[in-house]
Image: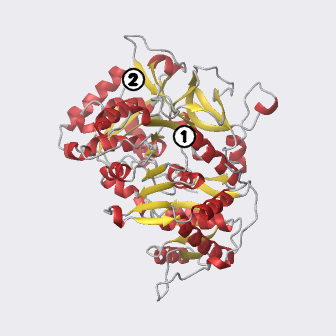
Amino acid sequence: MTRFETFTELVLARTGALGAKDAFIFLRDGATGSEADHLTYADLDTEAKRVASWLQSKGTFGKQVLLLFPSSMAFVKAFVGCLYAGAVAVPAPLPGDQGHHFQRVAGILHDAEVRAVLTDAANEPQISAWLAAEGLDHISCLAVDGVDEHGEPAYGDPEAWTRPSFGPDHLAFLQYTSGSTSAPKGVMVSHRNLLANEAAIQRSVGSDSESRFGGWLPFYHDMGLIGHILQPLWLGGSAVLMSPVSFLKRPFRWLQMIDQYKVTVGGGPNFAYDLCLRRVTDEQLATLDLSSWVAACNGAEPIRAETLRAFAERFAPAGFRAESFFPCYGMAETTLLVSGTPLGQAPVERTADAVALERGELLAAGPDAPARTLVSSGIIEDFDVRIVEPQSLAQQPDGHVGEIWIKGDSVAPGYWARPETNKEIFDAGIAGTEGPDAAGWLRTGDLGVLDEGQLYVTGRLKEMVIINGRNLYPHDVERAVQAMDPALGAGAGSVFAVDTDREHLVVVQEVRATAVSTDLPTLLAGIRQLVGKEFNVPAGNVLLVRPGTIRKTTSGKIQRTLMRKLFLDGAITALHSSLDTEVAALLRASAEPVLEPVA
């Protein structure tokens, strides 16, 4: 493949060479074949130049441009338009979309020092009104699908576009992390980072220009943007896209899309496969042909072995193969992908001794020992990865758990306008080392272990629960609780610890909507007994809540830090609960107003 200095150069080459080929197909809600929107490479080029000419007239070269769109072709045109203008795209959730409101977007807008906003005609009036109300009416807002009274584009001129000049270290976009309680942080992704990671994805997935991608993830999410939109452009391939709402309302439509358009690569978090298992009927399954699907990405950490097995077994009659699963690991700070399972290889599993794992060692479980099944997130080809003890900063040998530290061309230079945080997170040093290994490491905050070339992600460093000196992984407890009873199996859960004079385990678990009339006291008692017996820790704090209570990121990860804050703030409404005396007192104290002393 010709070497390109920037992703803009690459897209210009693709659009010039591929002309009438479909770059993207978008399925609107309820749409079928002939009703889908098609965007060819030639049309993408024209529309992106139209957007870029407007951006250039506003002086946005090297400046941030906020993208606020529903999932649609308009987002793709706007993003590529930013590339063509040399502007720095800032994809963000549309206010009101999937529960997001203007507060979060306002934080991104101010943090990123945005110079212009791109959106669509349906949302432009509301967004312009919001900008005016915030005293930001000096920031230009454009509807990229706006038309005049003759139905012609109301802005820009592709012929007026001029090709910008910049190098590989120019920023391509800011990827804002979907954190919970912390202020938004924008990962600075350069053209060099983006090109390097797209090459890493291609090598890991085994994709080429004939590959067809298919997905529903939000376009502002790193996997949705880099995996389902930019990877097809990098390859000169094509993608079929749909909205997250379409998928959540009818998961069958995603699988139907894979069948209809012969999708070869596509995926999502672990919960997407769980949702298909629960919601796709036997009658629907009988109509599917999933044999084209060669890389079914699963990017949740940790990946659930039981989900992979159940999905492979259930959808085998539709032609799905277990070796099509592509467990992988990555994060916005590394642009996207770090590791993946080689094409055609079944996911690698390890049955680990649970007690040894708590001590930080990966050992095989004996026949009667408590065990935990780990799924490998694949092998590492394009990065240098080390496992480091997070307190001493000493490198760990293979088979020992520690924090995952990373170096590579895909690792971003840092967060926008966060020099102190960047020194701590993106320029860490391994104790006792000299030379090039002494510094410059990205601290991921993820716990993992390397064994026989495989990377196993075991949890998040900040979410580790320490009870009576024991390290507990919250997702292990959550999984055990949900497997206990069908009333809990379809709901999400969150496990965390709170501190009085000692650590207390807290379990917040959703109860299936059709089961809220279940004997909740009996269900709660069963959870306490299960956790006490299986994990040998007291479970005096259990809250059974309605579906939708557990907060998640856009990729479906449980926001345990946020759930802990909501719990301590008394902001979780339980259908039924049990609290330790000390924890109940802690909540009462936090709810009482603080009285200032009288002068």
Q: Which sits in the foreground, 135 or 478? A: 478
Name the residue type under label 2: Val
Kindly identify which numbered label has been placed on residue 511.
none
Name the residue type under label 1: Gly
473 up-or-down from 543: above or below: above
Examine the image and state in which quarter residue 544 appears: top left
Query: Mark 1 falls on what kind of element?
Result: loop
Could you tell which of marks 2 and 1 lies nearer the N-terminus? 1
- The crowding category of the residue bearing disc 1, from other C-alpha atoms within 10 Å (few below 14, some 14 to 19, many at least 20), is some
* Lateral position of residue 484 relative to residue 179, left or right: left
Q: Residue furthest bottom?
A: 149
Quadrant into which the C terminus falls: bottom right
Residue drawn 65% across the image and 66% down it: 84
Residue 67 locus on image (x, y percent): 55, 65
Closer to viewer: mark 2 or mark 1: 1
502 up-or-down from 441: above or below: above
Q: Which residue is mark 2?
A: 537
Q: Which sits in the foreground, 504 or 500? A: 504
Mark 2 in CB contact with mark 1 (< 8 angstroms): no
- The crowding category of the residue bearing disc 2, from other C-alpha atoms within 10 Å (few below 14, some 14 to 19, many at least 20), is some
Q: Residue furthest right?
A: 435
Q: Which residue is mark 1?
A: 206
Q: Which sits in the foreground, 55 or 420? A: 55
Residue 344 locus on image (x, y percent): 47, 32
Q: Which sits in the foreground, 140 or 182? A: 140
348 up-or-down from 427: above or below: above
Query: Mark 2 falls on what kind of element?
Result: loop
* Lateral position of residue 102 relative to residue 56, left or right: left
* Residue 192 is at least partly visible in this image: yes
Examine the image and state in which quarter residue 454 appears: top right
Residue drawn 45% across the image and 73% down it: 123
